[in-house]
DNA sequence: GCCGTTTTCGGCCCGACTGTTTTCAGTCG
């Protein structure tokens, strides 16, 4: 079940959506949307707040605070219920169709009584949209095409899929004559865990050849929009890619604009307006004279707004503007800060590479220490035994001689059973340098049981790291249900680190929970969980998740020198 | 509906592209 903040934010967002369909004041709608974001991102649980406390949330005034009280008392908001009675849920669902927004949704609902996606498709096939103001033949085709796209799942893709595609597009476009610079931007640059469309920015005085080359890429199956400055295409697997070409002198302003988020851009542009300036993708201008002030680098744009450069993973209007103004931006952890990796597998269990190859890959990353943590016996399919574990330890000690610069740690990944117990007794566990413990089964326990289970794992003196704590698989398996604040308190109290697992379909602990956990004083392990040599490169996604959680190197135990890490692992 | 080292009222980010428009609304990011 979601936190009160998330449920309330969803209700306020629904209020904004429904008002945009009925034609409410645009600024009022924006105020609701802004408040919904602020509530979702607010660190305090709103269920413990009174009217005054609620009004302290940014973008929440008296009116919205009272709606939140309404929600806390009744589980819903009266105005939302009233609008739901007017606007069927299916009409709101219509706005999920690409090219169909609130105005067109209301038009077909009012004129034709259409109140669901299938009804709309049927109405188009029956020719009932003909003659409806604002609806021509092309609009009909676009809507049917949009419905078809929605049916094919499509949607967002994992970050590694988007990153690989972006890399290919950037490499191709960089070769085009006249291309001065080219890079990806958007949610991929902000390191969001999934990406809805890939944004690519290029600088050139002559956009024509870039647009040509872009639409001619082999994986492009459809050109959605084609203009002088912007072109959008769809790839064979349904992913949308936008190319924006700007003059070279606009590079910094364009990169800032195209990186987003939209909410962050609104904040920076508001700051500009208040200072008598105007910020667009072409630069920062004097609002009165139209004179260009700066545009060549992001740093210049931020500096002229009175802000330090803000790392893209923070650009979500989640407090980064306030922190920047106060000079309190965190020094975010980076890949180069990592001295070690505390979670990896070999072909002794379900890895695909040998111990020697995995260790060589770790050495190739320039690490100072590396833990091999194959699965423990209770995950019986992996066929681990005491003897195998001890034999591996001996092989690791032998291999150590060939890697003088890399300290090898012998660890294991334990299974947290439904009661919170783990494989092996205390005596055997004491023989490992590091123990990761993870949930691998019984994912659907209720919140109280799951919370007890995770807390008990933290309380085990031999458990150093909770692996992929929510056990989610993005798009395939929901996170387990737990009272996370309770788990975070236990992790902080017992000196148990929470993992940020680098697998692109895990990224677990997720960034929003990372940020919440940090407030409790929790420490983190940023690990690959590598099962193959190639998985080592996933570490950048875990670091991106840590950055989105506002973590500094000090928050991450595997940035620490080995002696400090060993002291932490003693759990005293 | 929110908010104020210019304001408690009058503002509220900015631009690209499409389609159906005789000059611009809707959608998107």
Image: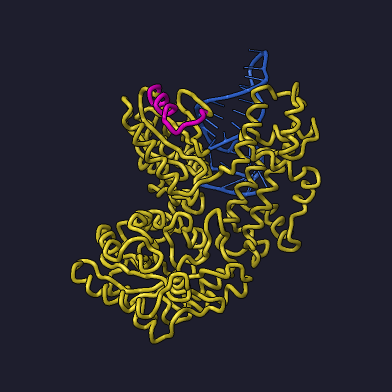
Chain colours: A yellow, B blue
Point out the stretch of residues depicted in magenta: A208-223
In the displayed structure image, the side of residue A349 where residue A130 appears, left or right: right
Q: Nearer the viewer, residue A351 or A363?
A: A351
Residue A384 in view here: yes
Instruction: Give the quadrant of the N terminus of chain A.
Output: bottom right
Residue A274 in view here: no
Q: Nearer the viewer, residue A467 or A46?
A: A467
Residue at 47 percent across and 36 percent down: it is: A241
Residue at 68 percent across and 61 percent down: it is: A51
Residue A214 falls within the magenta-colored stretch: yes
Residue at 34 percent across and 67 percent down: it is: A558
Q: Where residue A461 sits in the image (x, y, percent)?
A: 43, 82
User: Residue A44 sits in which quadrant?
Assistant: bottom right
Q: Where residue A315 sits in the image (x, y, percent)?
A: 46, 48
Q: How many marks overall?
A: 0
Instruction: Give the quadrant of the C terminus of chain A.
Output: bottom left
User: Residue A144 sits in which quadrant?
Assistant: top right
Residue at 45 percent across and 44 percent down: it is: A162
Q: Where residue A253 sits in the image (x, y, percent)?
A: 41, 36
Residue A87 to residue A234: above or below: below
Residue A23 falls within the magenta-colored stretch: no
């Amino acid at each position: 079940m979601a936190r009160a903040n998330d449920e309330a934010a969803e209700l306020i967002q629904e209020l904004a959506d429904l008002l945009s369909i009925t034609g409410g004041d645009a600024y009022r709608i924006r105020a609701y949307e802004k408040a919904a974001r602020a509530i979702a991102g607010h660190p305090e649980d709103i269920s413990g707040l009174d009217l005054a406390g609620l009004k302290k949330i940014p973008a929440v005034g008296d009116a919205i605070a009272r709606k939140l009280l309404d929600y806390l008392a009744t589980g819903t908001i009266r105005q939302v219920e009233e609008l739901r009675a007017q606007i069927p849920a299916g009409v709101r669902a219509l706005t999920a169709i690409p090219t169909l927004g609130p105005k067109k949704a209301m038009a077909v609902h009012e004129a034709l009584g259409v109140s669901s996606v299938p009804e709309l498709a049927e109405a188009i096939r029956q020719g009932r949209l003909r003659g409806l103001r604002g609806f021509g033949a092309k609009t009909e085709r676009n809507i049917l095409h949009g419905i078809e796209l929605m049916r094919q799942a499509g949607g967002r893709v994992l970050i590694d899929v988007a990153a690989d595609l972006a890399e290919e597009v950037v490499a191709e476009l960089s070769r085009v004559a006249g291309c001065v610079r080219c890079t990806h931007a958007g949610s991929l640059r902000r390191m969001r865990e999934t990406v809805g469309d890939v944004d690519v920015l290029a600088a050139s005085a002559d956009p024509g050849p870039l647009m040509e080359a872009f639409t001619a890429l082999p994986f492009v199956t459809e050109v959605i929009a084609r203009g002088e400055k912007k072109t959008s295409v769809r790839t064979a697997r349904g992913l949308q890619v936008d190319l924006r070409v700007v003059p070279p002198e606009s590079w910094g302003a364009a990169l800032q604009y195209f990186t987003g988020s939209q909410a962050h851009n609104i904040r920076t542009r508001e700051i500009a307006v208040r200072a008598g300036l105007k910020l667009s993708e072409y630069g920062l201008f004097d609002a009165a004279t139209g004179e260009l002030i700066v545009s060549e680098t992001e740093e210049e744009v931020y500096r002229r707004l009175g802000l330090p450069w803000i790392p893209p993973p923070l650009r979500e209007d989640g407090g980064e503007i306030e922190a920047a103004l106060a000079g309190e931006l965190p020094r975010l952890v980076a890949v180069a800060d990592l001295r070690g990796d505390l979670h990896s597998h070999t072909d002794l269990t379900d890895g695909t590479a040998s111990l020697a190859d995995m260790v060589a890959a770790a050495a190739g990353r320039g690490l100072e220490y590396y833990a091999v943590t194959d699965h423990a016996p209770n995950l019986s399919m992996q066929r681990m035994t005491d003897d195998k574990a001890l034999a591996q330890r001996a092989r690791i000690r032998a291999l150590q001689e060939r890697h003088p610069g890399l300290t090898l740690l012998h660890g294991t990944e334990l299974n947290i059973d439904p009661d919170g117990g783990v494989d092996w007794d205390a005596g055997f566990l004491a023989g490992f340098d590091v123990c990761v413990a993870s949930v691998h089964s019984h994912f659907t326990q209720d919140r109280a049981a799951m919370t007890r289970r995770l807390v008990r794992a933290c309380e085990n003196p031999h458990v150093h790291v909770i692996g992929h704590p929510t056990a989610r698989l993005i798009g395939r398996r929901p996170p387990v249900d737990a009272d996370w604040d309770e788990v975070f308190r236990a992790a902080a109290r017992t000196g148990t680190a929470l993992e940020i697992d680098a697998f692109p379909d895990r990224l677990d602990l997720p960034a929003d929970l990372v940020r919440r956990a940090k407030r409790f004083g929790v420490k983190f392990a940023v690990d690959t969980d590598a099962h193959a040599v190639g998985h080592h490169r996933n570490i950048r996604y875990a670091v991106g998740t840590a950055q989105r959680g506002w973590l500094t190197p000090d928050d991450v135990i595997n940035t620490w020198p080995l002696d400090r890490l060993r002291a932490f692992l003693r759990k005293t």
